[in-house]
């Protein structure tokens, strides 16, 4: 377990450098988790990627083992946390792969510090997710009855019926992951989602971008992610079959294949100066 102090909180992260025999000196891949999850959602994709690349995963503020800090949040606040973590780890250039709110954080980092971003994988995300009414209703419901009270309405957006079966131990595990997130952190992140509109920022993206969605995503459906891709110059749009909102968990092989193809397009970093 690794922790770094970033502003008012300790951020929990896991940095795995590229293996000694790595053939590719490309940028670090940074994975940014979604609302109600922690860094473990990337375990299977990390394993499949192997040790050719350095990989950073972390729990965004208010999730997993990271601190909660001052609430409510903004996407900018979450983006500053990642910028702080990249600086602490001396990572000068990264491919950011953000899932859902993580995709908004990736867009936020690009808007604030484009120099840090070699490419973007915007997964099951959008320039704007949901409506103010929707987020207010969700915040009110869980403020009253807790996160477990929305488990049975959340899981059908995250996972396909084939995954949501009683004899799937992984499904039980992801239900537990959701229900055990800190309530204050979850609500503070809903507030950030409610306020976020990255339409103009998406139009200004200049780095290679891959937009991914699961064909059965109930939170950011394919048409919405296609709309995001349409805003970004040259962005590629890919749909993963047999997946909901978290295709990296449900279809890790297909997800990793798309990532690998995309990473081949990103040139290795040529250090400037001296
Ligand atoms: O609807 C959900 O719970 C999924 C979701 C929306 C934003 C995010 O990060 O996850």
Image (spheres, rainbow, N blue to C red):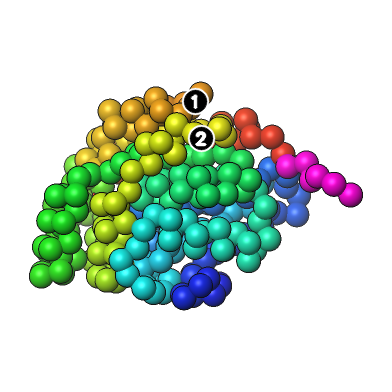
Position of 62 with respect to 10 (left or right) is: left
Q: Nearer the viewer, residue 79 or 256?
A: 79
Gap in angstroms between the C-alphas marked 2 and 1: 7 Å
Is residue 40 in the magenta section?
no
x and y, in percent, of residue 91 in the image: 66, 56
Q: Which mark is residue 262?
A: none
x then y, percent, for residue 76? 43, 56
In x, y percent, where is residue 108?
46, 48
Instruction: Indicate if the residue with disc 1 has its beta carbon within 8 Å of ligand 1.
Output: no
Locate residue 21, reporting x and y percent: 76, 49
Work out whether 112 lies above or below 67.
above
Which span is picked out in magenta? Answer: 269-274
Q: Main secondary structure of the magenta part?
A: loop
Marked residue nearer the N-terminal end (2 or 1): 2
Q: Residue at 26% x, 58% y: name it.
A: 190
| 35 left or right, relative to 77 | left
Q: Dividing the picture into quarters, in which one does residue 270 lie? A: top right
Circle 2 sits on which residue? Answer: 205
Task: For residue 85, say whether it is visible.
Answer: yes
**Position above or below: 198 against 2:** above
Answer above or below: position of 213 versus 163. above
Mark 2 falls on what kind of element?
loop
Whether residue 246 is visible, yes or no, is no
| Residue sticking out furthest to the front | 200
Foreground pick, 25 / 130: 130
Per the image, the residue denoted by label 1 is 233
Instruction: Tell me, yes or no, whether the highlighted magenta stretch contains residue 271.
Output: yes
| Quadrant hosting residue 265 | top right
Disc 2 + disc 1, Cβ < 8 Å:
yes
């Amino acid at each position: 377990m690794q922790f770094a102090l970033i502003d008012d909180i300790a951020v929990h992260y896991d940095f795995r450098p590229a293996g000694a025999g790595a053939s590719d000196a490309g940028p670090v891949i940074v994975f940014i988790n979604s609302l109600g999850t922690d860094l473990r959602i990337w375990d299977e994709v990390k394993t499949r990627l192997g040790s050719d690349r350095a990989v950073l995963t972390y729990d965004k503020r208010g999730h997993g083992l990271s601190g909660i800090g001052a609430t409510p949040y903004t996407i900018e606040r979450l983006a500053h946390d990642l910028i702080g973590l990249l600086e602490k780890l001396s990572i000068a250039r990264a491919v950011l792969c953000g899932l859902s709110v993580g995709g908004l954080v990736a867009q936020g980092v690009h808007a604030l510090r484009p120099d840090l971003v070699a490419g973007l994988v915007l997964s099951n995300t959008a320039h704007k997710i949901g409506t103010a009414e929707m987020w207010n209703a969700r915040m009110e419901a869980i403020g009253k009855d807790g996160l477990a009270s929305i488990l049975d309405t959340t899981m059908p957006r995250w996972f396909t019926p084939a995954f949501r079966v009683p004899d799937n131990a992984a499904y039980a595990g992801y239900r537990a992951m959701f229900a055990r997130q800190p309530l204050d952190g979850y609500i503070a992140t809903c507030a950030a989602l409610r306020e976020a509109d990255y339409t103009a920022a998406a139009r200004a993206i200049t780095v290679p971008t891959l937009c991914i969605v699961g064909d059965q995503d109930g939170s950011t459906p394919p048409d919405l992610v296609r709309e995001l891709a349409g805003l970004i110059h040259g962005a590629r749009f890919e749909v993963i079959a047999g997946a909901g909102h978290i295709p990296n968990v449900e279809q890790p092989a297909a997800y990793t294949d798309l990532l690998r193809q995309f990473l081949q397009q990103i040139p290795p970093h040529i250090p400037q100066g001296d």
